[in-house]
Amino acid sequence: MGGEDFDRRTGPYRPELLAHCYRMLGSVHEAEDLVQETLLRAWRAFDRYDDRRASLRTWLHRIATNACLTALRGRAHRPLPSDFVAPNPDPEAPMVVGEVPWLQPLPDALLDPATVVAARGSLRLALVAAMQLLPPRQRAILILREALDWSTAEIAEALDTTPAAVNSGLQRARARLGAVAVREEQVAEPADPQQRALLDRYVTAFQRADIAALTRLLTDDAVLEMPPVLNWYVGRERYGRFIARILALRGTDWRMLPTAANGQPALAAYVRDGDAYLPHTVQVFTVSGGRISRTVVFQDPAVFTAFGLAPLPADGQPTGSTRVPPPLIERVTFFPLDQ
């Protein structure tokens, strides 16, 4: 098969392969690498592909799953701070940074709209974070069953194991997810217009430094976490106090651009620095009952790259700058975590 024909036949599956590898790995960049590895393996083995045994989609996902399992050997999972430590009761406490590879958000823009709609529930950040706590093979079994709707026999063949082992792994995986309390509202389909309006009010309150208005948009038990910082907070009062701390530290001249990640509403936050607004954070929101119940804030240049964020000119002219602001951390304690 020629290269153009191979690309034509496999191209439609690339977005869902990216989503699949992301669920397995929790990293956009690693998922992109594994999609390329999948397609390379498929190209080399295409003369042995038999469409009577499996569809091209199934065959590619089988290759991708095993490529991900190989990549995950001996590797720690990608967590969120709430996976490691208890919430911090003091929003004024020094920031503690954990030196581990953290879970990353997946920009919706890297997927086609059909993939976002089809995969939205299984891409929710809370669910992907919970899946990262599973051993890799249990994670693969759960994803193949729940996200791709494969049969037990198909999973067993893909993983070179028995149906009994698949059923056992699936049972343990579901029990583990239940133990970390992934609630239904965390993975439910969002109501986009209502969520967009809510985030517009959030942006207005943030840019006006109106903490009272901002906290009224939160649930009583709203969570704020900020990898790589281990400090995370529960409750609208602590959430608001921490935002007030940030505004006191960084000032109130911000720009917020709407985006989307993991099928959820998100914002790209920029802070004024001289002649430009610099990318500061990507913030991914969970909305429950018409209010914000969780905000996960990412301040990682690799995440900015994945979202295509670049400095914004303050005067309408291109800045040509690639700098980013320093982290929102006055005092840092590096806390290496067990791998």
Image (tube, helix red, strand yellow):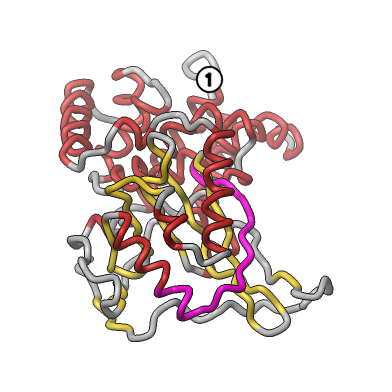
Above or below, comparing residue 153 to residue 247 in the picture:
above
Question: What residue is at 27 percent from the left and 35 percent from the top?
Answer: 183
Question: In what element is the residue under mark 1?
Answer: loop
Question: What residue is at 58 percent from the left and 43 percent from the top?
Answer: 108
Which quarter of the figure is the C terminus placed in? Answer: bottom left
Q: Amino acid at mark 1?
A: Ser
Q: Magenta segment range?
A: 245-262
Q: Is residue 99 found left or right of 323 in the rendered image?
A: left
Q: Is residue 178 found left or right of 218 in the rendered image?
A: left
> Dot 1: within a 10 Å radius of its alpha carbon, few (fewer than 14), some, or many (20 or more) residues?
few
Residue 79 among magenta residues? no
Question: What residue is at 36 percent from the left and 68 percent from the top?
Answer: 242
Please provide percent x and percent y for residue 50: 53, 20
Above or below, comparing residue 326 to residue 135 in the picture:
below
Above or below, comparing residue 158 to residue 43 in the picture:
above
Please provide percent x and percent y for residue 151: 34, 17
Q: Is residue 234 visible?
A: yes
Quadrant assignment, res 227: bottom left
Please provide percent x and percent y for residue 204: 58, 56
Q: Which residue is mark 1?
A: 55
Quadrant assignment, res 154: top left
In the image shown, does 326 or 133 lie closer to the viewer? 326
Which quarter of the figure is the N terminus placed in? Answer: top right
In the image shown, does 122 or 330 lie closer to the viewer? 330
Quadrant assignment, res 315: bottom right
In the image shown, does 20 or 174 lie closer to the viewer? 174
Q: Is residue 36 visible?
A: no
Question: What residue is at 34 percent from the left and 70 percent from the top?
Answer: 229
